[in-house]
Amino acid sequence: EDKVVQSPLSLVVHEGDTVTLNCSYEVTNFRSLLWYKQEKKAPTFLFMLTSSGIEKKSGRLSSILDKKELFSILNITATQTGDSAIYLCAVIRSGGSNYKLTFGKGTLLTVNP
Amino acid sequence: EPEVTQTPSHQVTQMGQEVILRCVPISNHLYFYWYRQILGQKVEFLVSFYNNEISEKSEIFDDQFSVERPDGSNFTLKIRSTKLEDSAMYFCATRGQGAGNTIYFGEGSWLTVV
C-alpha cells in the first residue's frame, strides 16, 4: 500500500518566518509528487514534481524532490497570514494514465501576525 | 484560471436517502475523479473515470456508489442509500490529457447524513 507521511502535522509561526514542510513517501512505481494548499475547501494546486533535484518556484513558495531519499520539501519564505492553510502532499504512481492521488494527512500551518 | 464546479455546496440528507452530487469539469478535460474527506481525516480516492467508464475504484466505492456522465458535461456521483458514515466533503477533480497535466479540484460538496 502506498504511504505518504507529512511532518510536522501542525506548525505555528509568526509573519515573516520561513517554514519548511516535509513529505516522505513509499510508493510502488513512483511517477510524481504534488503539493496542494487547502484553505477552506478545495485543494489548490501548487507544484507537481517529477524529476529529482530540480527546484520549482512560485513567488515565496518553492519545492524540491529527492527521489533517492524518497522525500520532498515545501519552503515558504517571508510567511504571511494568508499562507495559513493545510498543505497537502500527494503522490502518483506511474503506469497508465489514471493518475490516482494518494494523499498524506497534511500539515496545518498557522501564521500569526 | 479554469474551474471545476460542484453542486450542491452543502446537502443535508436523512439516512437511507439517495444523493446525487454534480460536477462540471474543466472544458477539454477527459479524466474525472471523486475524492472524499471525512472531517479531520485524509483526502481519500474514491473512483476515476475515463472514456465513459470507471478506470479504477477504491474499497470505499462499494455498490452503494455509482458515477456517470449522462450528458457529456456533468459528472455525477450517486450514493443510493446514504449512511451516517458517508458524511464527508466530496471533491470532484479533473485532468486534461498528457503526461504533464495535473489534477484540479472543485470546491467540494459537503454532505451531512442525519
Image (cartoon, rainbow, N blue to C red):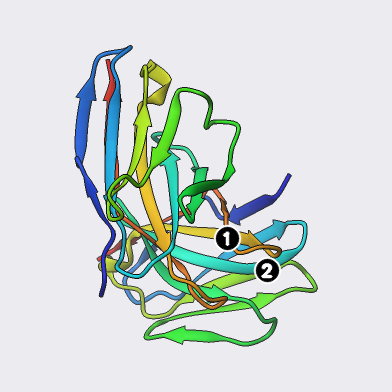
Can residue A109 be seen here? The reply is no
Residue at 60% of width from left, 67% of height from top?
A33
* Residue at the extreme right of the image, as rendered: A68
Q: Quadrant of the N terminus of chain A?
A: top right
Residue at 29% of width from left, 72% of height from top?
A80
The residue that disc 2 covers is: A31
Can you tell which quarter of the image residue B65 is in?
top left
Is residue B2 rendered to the left or right of residue B64?
A: left
Please, what is the three-letter code of the amino acid marked with disc 1? Tyr
In the displayed structure, A5 sits above or below A91; it is above
Which numbered circle lies on residue B3?
none
Is residue B40 rendered to the left or right of residue A50?
A: left
In the displayed structure, B105 sits above or below A45; it is above
Given residues B19 and A48, the one toward you in this image is B19
- Circle 2: element type: strand
In the displayed structure, B23 sits above or below A51; it is above
Given residues A51 and B72, the one toward you in this image is B72
Can residue B52 be seen here? The reply is yes
Residue at 58% of width from left, 76% of height from top?
A49
Given residues B11 and B43, the one toward you in this image is B11
Is residue A106 rendered to the left or right of residue B6?
A: right
Q: Earlier in the sequence, mark 1 or mark 2?
A: 2
Given residues A93 and A22, the one toward you in this image is A93
User: Mark 1, chain letter?
Assistant: A
- Circle 1: element type: loop
Which numbered circle lies on residue A99?
1
Residues at discs 1 and 2 in contact (Cβ within 8 Å): yes
Return the x and y of residue A104 as percentages of the image width and height: 57, 51
